[in-house]
């Protein structure tokens, strides 16, 4: 199972910051999650909200040059330079025009095989088809009425994984996704009990802000000791 440190593991540091990503890997995470935007001069930068705040003014990052952004906002290049490539990287794609630049940077670092691109709402299947072999669909409304048809449409579009909130998954839904040849990811698993439920259900990946809890539960499921005496108190 892949344990993704959400925004680098923001329970342990600032969102999407290089030091937070480095810390997550040092705590034993085998995956990182981040959010990508492309600046007006073509740099892939990692930021959740995608805006530059100057006083009361909010300017979308795609309208801003890289050198105008705060120093703590890293580029994808800087992430790979600091962390290497020995981890799975999940990137939340906010618009289709960010897909190719993200793939290009990962490919340049020999890391494309461990790259998961997450389709944000509003990015449709036609834009995703064939762009990258590990496109991943946000699972909102993928586990309710009419699920089978939506899952089949995702499979036909080349989607490789369904990412749904951890509590939406059931064993039969996991089996259905697996039967279609896709992986099942659970996000927003913050307590040890929710991470453990993802493991028991047979999910292929889980996202959490709490790297220590994540690593402890994944290590326990594999019968291995958690590194560094992880805190598993909640």
Image (spheres, helix red, strand yellow):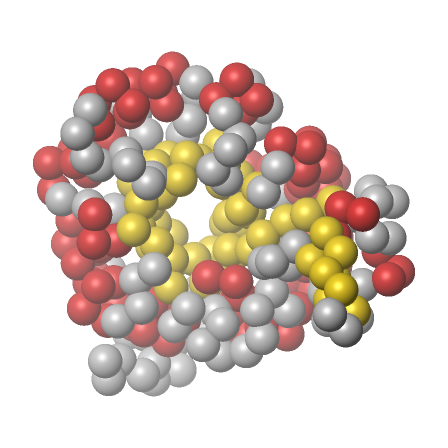
The image quadrant of residue 180 is top left
Residue farthest toward the front in the current orientation of the protein: 56
- Can residue 145 be seen here? The reply is yes
Residue situated in front as seen by the camera: 115 or 145: 145
Q: Quadrant of the C terminus?
A: bottom left
Q: Percent x, y for residue 224?
A: 27, 68
Residue farthest toward the left in the current orientation of the protein: 172
The image quadrant of residue 144 is top left
The residue at the point 58 percent across, 42 percent down is 94
Residue situated in front as seen by the camera: 203 or 167: 167
- Can residue 133 be seen here? The reply is no
Q: Percent x, y for residue 88?
A: 50, 49
The residue at the point 56 percent across, 55 percent down is 34
The residue at the point 45 percent across, 76 percent down is 11
Direction from residue 17 to residue 86 in the image, left or right: left
The residue at the point 37 percent across, 35 percent down is 161
Direction from residue 85 to residue 7 in the image, left or right: left
Direction from residue 17 to residue 42 in the image, left or right: right
Q: Percent x, y for residue 44?
A: 74, 48
Q: How many marks?
A: 0
Q: Percent x, y for residue 216?
A: 29, 72
């Amino acid at each position: 199972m892949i344990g993704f440190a959400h925004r680098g593991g923001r329970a342990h540091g600032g969102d999407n910051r290089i030091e937070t990503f480095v810390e997550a890997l040092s705590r034993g995470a085998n995956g990182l999650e981040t959010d990508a935007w492309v600046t007006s001069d073509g740099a892939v930068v990692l930021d959740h909200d995608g805006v530059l705040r100057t006083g009361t003014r909010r300017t979308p990052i795609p309208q801003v040059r890289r050198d105008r952004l705060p120093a703590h906002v890293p580029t994808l290049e800087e992430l790979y330079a600091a962390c290497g490539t020995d981890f799975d990287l999940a990137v939340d794609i906010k618009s289709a025009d960010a897909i190719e630049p993200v793939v290009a940077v990962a490919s340049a670092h020999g890391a494309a095989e461990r790259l998961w691109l997450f389709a944000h709402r509003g990015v449709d299947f036609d834009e995703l088809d064939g762009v990258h072999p590990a496109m991943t669909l946000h699972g909102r409304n993928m586990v309710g009425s009419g699920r089978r048809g939506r899952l089949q449409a995702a499979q036909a579009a080349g989607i490789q994984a369904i990412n749904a909130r951890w509590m939406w998954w059931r064993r039969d839904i996991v089996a259905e996704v697996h039967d279609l040849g896709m992986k099942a990811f659970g996000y927003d698993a913050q307590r040890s009990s929710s991470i453990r439920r993802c493991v028991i259900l047979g999910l292929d990946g889980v996202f959490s802000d709490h790297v220590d809890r994540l690593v402890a539960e994944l290590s326990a499921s594999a019968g291995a000791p958690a590194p560094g005496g992880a805190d598993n108190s909640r």
